[in-house]
Image (tube, grey):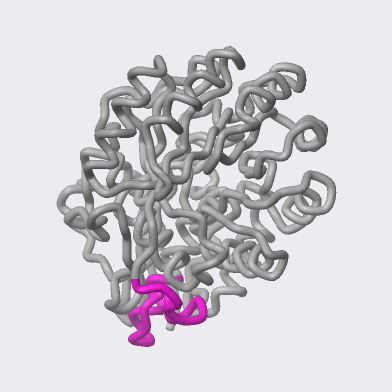
Amino acid sequence: MKIAQIDIFNFELTYVHGTYMMSGGRDITSLQSTLVRVTADSGHQGWGEVCPLGSAYLPQHAGGARAALELLAPALIGLDPTNLCAVYDTMDAVLMGHSYAKSPIDVACWDLTGKAWGASVAEMLGGVRQQRFPLYFAVPLGSPEEMVAYVLARREEGIHRFQLKIGGDPTLDGIRAKHIIDATGPEDLIVGDANCGWRVNDAIIAARAMEHLPRFYFEQPCPTMEECIEVRKHTTLPMVYDEVVNDPATLIRAVREGGAGAFNLKVSKVGGLTKAKLMRDLGQELGLQMTIEDTWGGDVVSAASAHLAASTKERALLSVSFMNDWTNEHVAGYQPRSVNGFGAAPSAPGLGIEIDVQALGKPLYSFG
């Protein structure tokens, strides 16, 4: 079997709740997602997706992904898509770094391989350990009253994992966190995510304000690993690392020096399912909890996250995001779909979803 063609598509995604607000004035209403279709000479096809969260969240953006894919795709024509390591080695030989741009090709090859072998991606990742898993929703930055109202509305939908967007005024953030803890119950888990919004002093002030809160995790207070390590020395809150964990080396450092108890595993950020499996397995062996998710995306991103989550040990899984619950548009019939705050991996071969190619229109680029 050989790769015969690679097609790259654009698909716009809008946020289901209007404006998604993070620290530093980073507001999002819509994003450009990039979908990749890999077709083999056998007729089997696989799909992948990458959707950076704008251009000021991580060092990535939609245009950068597409420019990188223009370099990567021609080099892969003629390779065996089921030889996942060879595909990845070729991408690394063609382009240094740019893991997020390599991710949709890698995921598409996992999808294609599963379809060719008659196995789901979860089975290929080691087997299904969880038939269902808890989902989380991010709570956009707003007034304490607005954030509480948002949380209570999502609780009515069955959600009991929440990621509060904080990282502004540390005193007000402490009030936000307390209001939400007071409005929720023992079955709810609350993560305060600053998205690198503080410097060390403000982060310490915020941590002191939140120190006594039950069921509360403290996520990514500062932009650098060094700053987060310093903040860790001043709080006993469970720490979640996100933006500064990109590979096994940074994950190990977060554990050894930063006292990490959990980390966020974004499939596209680390380079696709091949790399995400490595990070997931390492995290499990280090005794960490993790949230399995992505920067943004739709049905394809959600399916990839679902299969990785389903094959993860239950005690290691903090929560999961189905990004297609956060968007209005759907390219695979809104599959996989959450049910009362829980998700599950599709059981059909590959990612287990069917793409509506007509909804995508003509490819931006085709190679092969």
> Looking at the image, can residue 172 be seen?
yes
Q: Nearer the viewer, residue 351 or 132?
A: 132
**Picture quadrant of residue 91:** bottom right
Any magenta on residue 1?
no
- Residue 277 location, x and y as percent? 58, 68
Question: Relative to residue 250, is residue 234 depicted above or below?
Answer: above
* Quadrant position of the C terminus in the picture: bottom left
Any magenta on residue 116?
yes
- Residue 7 location, x and y as percent? 35, 56
Question: Relative to residue 64, is residue 294 depicted above or below?
Answer: below
Q: Nearer the viewer, residue 310 or 191?
A: 191
Question: Relative to residue 198, is residue 105 depicted above or below?
Answer: below
- Residue 44 location, x and y as percent? 31, 76
Q: Is residue 85 left or right of residue 153?
A: right
State the extent of the magenta-drawn residues as a range.
Answer: 110-131
Give the residue at x 52% y 43%: 215
Give the residue at x 27% y 77%: 348
**Picture quadrant of residue 356:** bottom left
> Looking at the image, can residue 365 be seen?
no
- Residue 82 location, x and y as percent? 48, 79
Q: Is residue 224 left or right of residue 175?
A: right
Give the residue at x 65% y 56%: 94
Q: Is residue 330 left or right of residue 210?
A: left
Q: Is residue 106 left or right of residue 140?
A: right
* Quadrant position of the N terminus in the picture: bottom left
